[in-house]
Image (cartoon, rainbow, N blue to C red):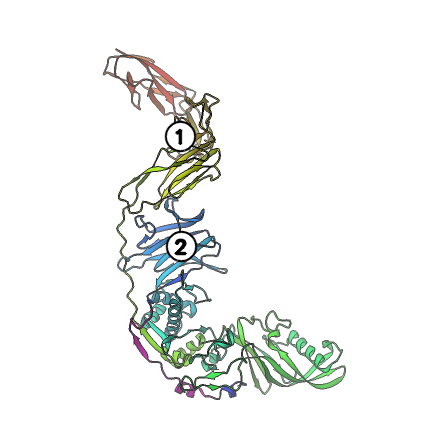
Amino acid sequence: MKNICTRVIGMAVAALLLFCAVIPVVTMSKAEAAGDYSYIRVKLSIGSTVKSKELTVDGNYYLKEAPEAAVARGKYTVKLEDGKLSLYRADGGAVLRGSDTVSFISCQPDAGSENLITLRRIYGTNSKNRDYLGDISFSIAGGYLRCINRVYLDDYIAGVIPYEMSESWPLEALKAQAILARTYAARRLTTNQPNYELVDYSSDQTYCGYNAAYTRSMQAAKETAGQILYCGDEMVQAYYAATNGGYVDIPQHVWSSSKKLEPYEVVKEDPYDAEYHSSGTEESIRLQRDGKLLGTDGKTSKNFNSYLKTLAVAALGSDASYADVAINSIEAVTPKGYRTKHDAISFTKCSGHAASDFETMAECPNYTTFSVKMNVTVGGKTSAVTVVMDATKLAEGGPYAVYKKTDSTLRLYKLSSDSSGFMLTHCRWGHGVGMSQCGAYMMAKNHGKSYREIIAFYYPNTTIKALSIAEEEEIQAPSAVAVTSLKAKSAIRVVRVGKTTKLTYTLRPSNATNKKVTYKSSNTKVATVSSSGTVKGRNSGKALITATTANGLTTRYYISVVKRSPTRRVKKISLSTQYKTIAVGKTYKPRVNLSPRNASNRHMFYISSNPAIAKVGWSSGRITGVSAGRTTIKVYSADSKKYMKFYVTVTDSAKITNVKSVRVSKSSLSLKRGRSYQVKASVRPKTATTNDIRWYSANSKIAKVSSDGKITAVRKGTTYIYAVSYDNGKYKRIRVRVR
């Protein structure tokens, strides 16, 4: 089959190889390299509207924002909360809160291993966990998480090669890919981008991190380490694409026709790409001389026939329907119109001449319209007619779709002919500029070409320069002292509307590396808090202020905002009961009484001593059982700072049997000072869910009691010892006289 554009090239493959000499490698000193190319920053595809991201740490890392915080191996979650970032362990514990960034810095790995962070890469419908070397940092962009991988340049290249080509491809082709990928990346490093240089998909280069199984790609990166492609003193704009359809193209035909033509930018025939065949990279339709029009499946195409018949009716000026037209024969098909931008600049080819002395091509190898001369019969009359066919109308989505690939995917139309007719091939997967990856594959596999010969063919008038790139960093985790304790001073505060109060705390140890504390108000309509911890009353009500260290420790302040200073102060606080047993997941709200009832400030606060057993609404007072055990809820009056203890027992039993009564082995005692007596207590029924007893003395200066009921006389006098059921407050008292 003869290709129509072959005569345009007029140059044999052997001649092409003769003129395109093998590229030498020139060592470039670090002083000559304008900039540091050791590391590159890549924006990872984690989803465009993500506010929470899980990741797994396997190796030695520290947090840039909190060096003192331990980063152990395991799972973590980065969350965007109230405009700031937080980092949580898998158990829910906070590692970092209230930060603008979260940065995992890779330290020196253990011998024989790599530091890796695993996270799910999401691009389009593809979602898969990927491993990444280097540093991983999160920041906020447009109200969502942004993730950047700062990685050693050649580690980045090893993460590009197997996804832009294939791990199984010939090593020399992979090396050519390595040089172009590295050149593309290094060129971006010169642009001084503020946040990152590259994205990890085809808008730049597909990068999917580290894969230990891809040893050939790592070998290709290693054996070309630091090698960059130059034209004179400038880095080449290193474009490449899957296939070019048999012709190397130039950027001016694809993107900007006004761009200056570089010495390495050529339009020429690529016999190696043409040699590669894949059903995914080209489709052909036929216009047979006998008048049959065949689609990509080799069968007569109804759409194709409809299109040419419609053109014939229009060309003849007939008012007949296209259905009344019979195509008898196809006499000739010739190229007519260029694709957009292809007529705006001369076409060049590698000729072995000086960079400024190019030859121009006589014709463009990429047409979109074709002149079709055919013999047709309309209404019984046979005529010769010539029409102009627009091949783009035959593309997927066009009005007469015959091809199954979109015009944006396959971008070249080639015309060829043989004795039976004409073939219009839709090919070129990608833009076709620079190196054809499939062409490089064929050069290495079938023709034994080296990576230097591959680069020379696709990028004439260029030189490979080996940059003196710095060795990979070996960072030691900084010595840091972590905050171990943060405790609020005067945690319960009353502030008038319009007035302020300054929050204070005790932080330990005093020599902690990062003493930064951030604040957050639960209700800014009631009380606001500044970054320095100054609270201002806004409106009457209650607010919770949470103070958080950089490594996630917290303490709370309970703020009561009032319009004016209280005139009737709270004198007493009491509970209807101080004891309750509840099941896990169940709730209970204790009834609180303040005296006097008309106290000016009746704000109450509730604090659990162990939220892992029972949590409590700090304002509502509603208690929820979390896990089996016992804890204390302190019920505070904001006005007086007085509190009562509420003892809650949480059980995982589905059914609770309550205590009916408490019995003691002795109802009264007379003891000499210094003497002791053991009293035993029990509950009824014996099957009660909670049978524990709380012992306390009404006056421990006269007689004290241990937690198991041992009473000790202290000094002369009379008092009472109480044995109280933790279940519901049922009790017995023992009269004790000390003599």
Q: Please name the amino acid that badge 1 sits on.
A: Ile
Q: Quadrant of the N terminus?
A: bottom right
Residue 608 position within the rendered picture, expressed as x and y whole percent measured from the top left: 39, 33
Q: Please name the amino acid that badge 2 sits on.
A: Phe
Q: Nearer the viewer, residue 68 or 224?
A: 68
Please tell me whether mark 2 sits on a helix, a strand or a loop.
Answer: strand
- CA–CA distance in space, label 1 to label 2: 39 Å
Number of the front mark, 1 or 2 = 2
Residue farthest to the front, as pictured: 498
Please tell me whether mark 1 sits on a helix, a strand or a loop.
Answer: strand
In this view, 634 is above or below 325: above
Residue 270 is marked as none
Determine crowd level at label 1: few under 14, some 14-19, many 20+ residues with C-alpha closer than 10 A: many
Residue 138 is marked as 2
Determine crowd level at label 2: few under 14, some 14-19, many 20+ residues with C-alpha closer than 10 A: many
Q: Quadrant of the C terminus?
A: top left
Residue 342 position within the rendered picture, expressed as x and y whole percent measured from the top left: 54, 79
Please report the residue visible at 52 percent of the width from the left and 74 percent of the height from the top.
279
Q: Which residue is mark 1?
A: 633
- Residue 330 placement, left or right of 728: right
Residue 266 position within the rendered picture, expressed as x and y whole percent measured from the top left: 46, 81
Chain part drawn in magenta? 10-34
In this view, 518 is above or below 636: below
Do we see residue 457 in this rendering?
yes
Residue farthest to the left, as pictured: 674
